[in-house]
Amino acid sequence: MTNDQIVDKADLAISDLTGTGGYLNPMQANTFIRMLIDQPTIVKAIRTYPMNAPTMEINKIGFSGRILKPAPASGTALSQSNRSKPITDQVTLTTTEVIAEVHLPYDAIEDNIERGNLEDTVMALITAQASLDVEDLVINGNTSTGADAFLRLRNGILAQATSHIVDFQDSADRSVSKTIFKHGLKAMPSKYSTNRPSLRFYTSPNCEIEYADSLANRETVLGDTKINTWAKNSAYGVPVVAAAKMPNTQYILCHPKNIILGIQRQIMIETDRDIRSRVLIVVLTMRLDVKCEEEDAIVKGTGFLPDDDTPTTTTA
């Protein structure tokens, strides 16, 4: 086949992914969202809502304090002042459009046309990187600061977490050890920290390594285990998990399901070609939003130094 025929066939193959107007049909959209979530990032653990419209309201209900009271005499109802009324609220997701652009060289297209799996290749390329990008927005989005236009689209969890902040900036020892996690756990309101195994400390990969190293320095069976194997880390019963896009000097302590990601099902795929660069261009657009359900149940640690003892390295 000529190059034009190859690209025409690729256009036709990719068009099989889409329904009317370039939109993925509902089953394909759900598959894409599932592939996005299944990537090994923080997105896999948080709560995800596929949305049918740009706005969605999630109802919340709970109690602010004790509901049990001393029982009155038989046949007497509780007084109005002793009755408990649940608190109701809503979390509103309002999505913003994002775009991904993938360039496929003609020779890569030819190889995949012959094997008949071009659609799978395109979806794998897009979802693998898009998952990291979504994680970046979930963690580092900030509408008021930064030069990155993508991260200014939405406030991520670090920007939304303002009630409980543990700052080690002025501490005498800013190294990563059990101390930084102890103070984070003590800063969380006790009503949210009773089930510690369900919580997570989300740290940078470097911070996780430094914490594992601090445990490995102990002259115990645990220290030997940390040196010889890569066992899962935990601090005071709370798993310590590395998130690729978490800044080195910060962590988040929360229940993963307290973070909500909304993705609108109207996902569009379109193609174009650049004949001078000899590439087929695949463009995907979708809409998303991120919110925390209970901001009071999140602790942010900041100001520690996981790279304080890391030597400077150079590459040739």
Image (spheres, helix red, strand yellow):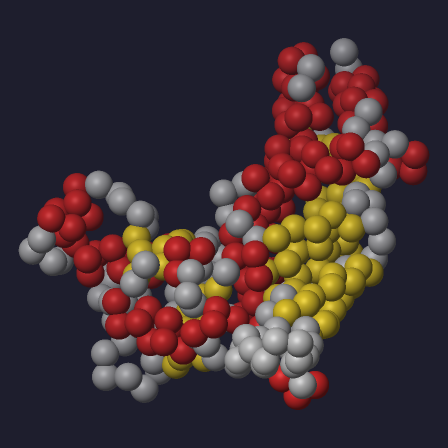
Seen from the viewer's position, the closer of residues 53 and 207 is 53
Where, quadrant-wise, is the N terminus in this rendering? Answer: top right
Query: Percent x, y for residue 150?
Result: 66, 62
The part of the image, by quadrant, that contains residue 247 is: bottom left
Seen at 28% across and 84% down, the residue is 171
- As drawn, the residue found furthest toward the front would be 74
Seen from the viewer's position, the closer of residues 96 and 240 is 240
Q: How many marks?
A: 0
Query: Percent x, y for residue 227?
Result: 17, 46
34 lies above or below 222: above
Q: Is residue 254 left or right of residue 278?
A: left
314 lies above or below 31: below
Q: Is residue 315 left or right of residue 309?
A: right
Seen from the viewer's position, the closer of residues 122 and 199 is 199
Q: Is residue 300 left or right of residue 38?
A: left
Q: Is residue 247 visible?
A: no
Seen at 32% across and 86% down, the residue is 170
The part of the image, by quadrant, that contains residue 308 is: bottom left
Query: Percent x, y for residue 289?
Result: 71, 60
88 lies above or below 1: below
Q: Is residue 29 visible?
A: yes
